[in-house]
Amino acid sequence: SVYASMWLASFQVMSRMSKANCLLIGEPGVGKTAVVEGLAKRIVDGDVPDALLGVQVFSLDVGSLLSGSSMRGEFERRMKGILDYLFASDRSTILFIDEIHTLMGAGKADGPMDAANLLKPALARGALRVIGATTRAEYRKHIERDMAFARRFVTIEMKEPDVAKTIIMLKGIRKNLENHHKLTITDGALVAAATLSDRYIKSRQLPDKAIDLIDDACAIKKVKSLRRLMNERAANEEKNGNGGSGDASSSANGDGEKKRDDLEKLEAEIAKEAEDADALTDADVADVVSLRTGIPVNKLTETDRQRLLSLPASLQAQVIGQEEAVEAVANAIIRSRAGLARRNAPIGTFLFLGSTGKLHFSN
């Protein structure tokens, strides 16, 4: 599994005698909550070390904990009730706290005690097993400042998965998406969702943006299919309902049977088209990305090789008489896309000199 290394690290920490607490740190959308959900599933399946067999996983809702606790002592009473319940389980529970940085200062009124301070003693002596999740920025801003709280946790860094791992994740949730949308999702659609979201949607992280793209494409596909079928059925009914009455009764009966046969044939054709249409393809995913980004669909589906081969010609068609500059920029881009450039380094740094054409070439 893609998250196998994360689960193994969590198993190792959770099996400790003291400070059996881990903190998942990663950007939004990289799958921190999915790791905990997968851990809970493996506990249910019994695919965990002996120290975690039969353990229950609870999620702490900090918002509900704070809601209506303005009266002095109310928050402490609620927090103590939760801790007493967990202590009574004798380490047979794991508490998951998403956005754990919200505990810092939570419930703090006039006194020095907040949720984090109430948890520190239990975390230190190993009476409580906690999995927290937060981002790197929030960890530095809130948790890292309180080293007494931070050192109770073993931090596990979660990085954004690459496209190949994202495709594996999408295949893992494909059945759930197909059951929800009543669609068949092709392998090409999964590959397109991972590659196109990685290339064109830069404001979010994999695998979250790829999953959202597939989900959105399925919803749009289903609505379009339903609208088309409704329009076709309405047109067929209108066509069959406006026929002539006929002069003779036998002629009318013959016309009615013919219309009925035609309608059944059309309905069978529509059903077959609907069955064929109920498959999400890479073209459908490209349509959604085009809708979000404004990039033409043909540019999204064109292969990298075709784009790279046509890059010098397309640049020279826009910038006349600057072959040296065009060649330098095109070669740098080709080297980068071929994997010959340094990882995480810029494609190139260029200084354009001259009286005219610098801004136009950059654009």
Image (cartoon, helix red, strand yellow):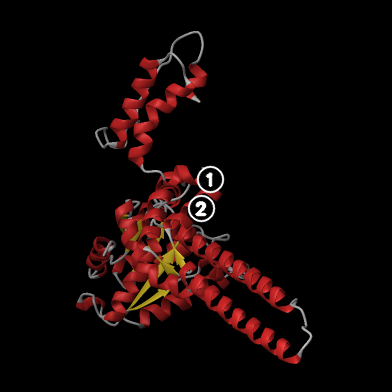
- Residue 209 drawn at (x, y percent): 45, 55
Q: Tell which circle, 2 or 1, labels the residue nearer the N-terminal end.
A: 2
Name the residue tied to disc 2. Answer: 287
Name the residue tied to disc 1. Answer: 293
The outermost residue toward the bottom is 249
Image point 68% across, 73% down: which residue?
Answer: 234
Closer to viewer: mark 2 or mark 1:
2
Q: Is residue 54 left or right of residue 243?
A: left
Q: Residues within 10 Å of mark 2 (few under 14, many from 20)?
A: some
Dot 2: element: helix
User: For this rendering, which residue is in front, 339 or 300?
Assistant: 300
Would you identify the image quadrant in which residue 265 lies?
bottom right
Image point 71% across, 91% down: which residue?
Answer: 250
How far is the residue under mark 2 from the one under mark 1? 10 Å
- Residue 340 drawn at (x, y percent): 24, 33
User: For this rendering, which residue is in front, 165 or 93?
Assistant: 165
> Is residue 134 positioned above or below 247 on the image?
above
- Residue 166 drawn at (x, y percent): 34, 57
The outermost residue toward the left is 50
User: For this rendering, which residue is in front, 231 or 113?
Assistant: 231
Q: Is residue 146 left or right of residue 8?
A: right
Q: Amino acid at mark 1?
A: Thr
Q: Amino acid at mark 2?
A: Asp
Dot 1: element: helix
Image point 61% across, 79% down: which residue?
Answer: 263
Please state, as top left, top right, bottom left or bottom right, where the N terminus lies in the image: bottom left
Image point 36% across, 38% down: which residue?
Answer: 306
> Is residue 174 positioned above or below 92 on the image?
above
Would you identify the image quadrant in which residue 65 lies?
bottom right
